[in-house]
Image: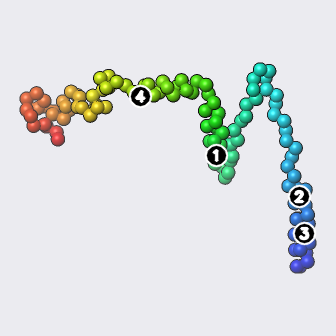
Amino acid sequence: MKQLCTLVASLMLGALPLAGHAATPVEAPAAAPGKAPTEGCVEVSVGGYKAPDYGCLSKQMGNNPDGAKAEQKNQEAMQVPIHKRPPNQMGLSTPAATSTRMGNTFGTSVKPQRP
């Protein structure tokens, strides 16, 4: 029995290099004339969960020539002048919020109906 296990193990180890050879790589299809070939990103699926290659996706998104323009526009949109900001973004109360807080005493008393 021990010799049989040894024989099976040696046959399996002997066949391992034959099964371990990778298939010959397939050439990517040629890119259209005038265009550079694009490299795709590989998604790995393990146990039913897909894990994309975020490094590759970041590279693809970072090489966008319009990305700098979009980033600059986003920064400009976030830098709204103080006099154009709504009062609730500056920590001030609005008339609607004050009216809700004061309730039916708005304009008649200094004690709010709601705290």
**C-alpha separation, residue under disc 1 versus residue under disc 2:** 30 Å
Mark 1 or 4 closer to N-term? Answer: 1
Q: In the rendered image, which residue does mark 3 sit on?
A: 10
Figure quadrant of residue 95: top left
Viewer-proximal residue, 110 or 49? Answer: 110
The residue depicted at 73 percent of the width and 34 percent of the height is: 39
Q: Amino acid at mark 2?
A: Pro
Q: Which residue is mark 1?
A: 51
Image-based side of 25 in relation to 35, left or right? right
Q: Looking at the picture, which amino acid does disc 3 mark?
A: Ser
- Distance Cα–Cα, label 1 vs label 3: 37 Å
Mark 3: which secondary structure?
helix
Mark in the foreground, 4 or 2: 4
Vertical arrangement, residue 85 with respect to residue 44, above or below:
above
Using residue 103 as the reference point, say whether residue 30 is left or right of it.
Answer: right
Image point (15%, 34%), residue name: 102
Image mark for residue 17:
2
Q: Earlier in the sequence, mark 1 or mark 3?
A: 3
Establish if 16 lies above or below 76: below
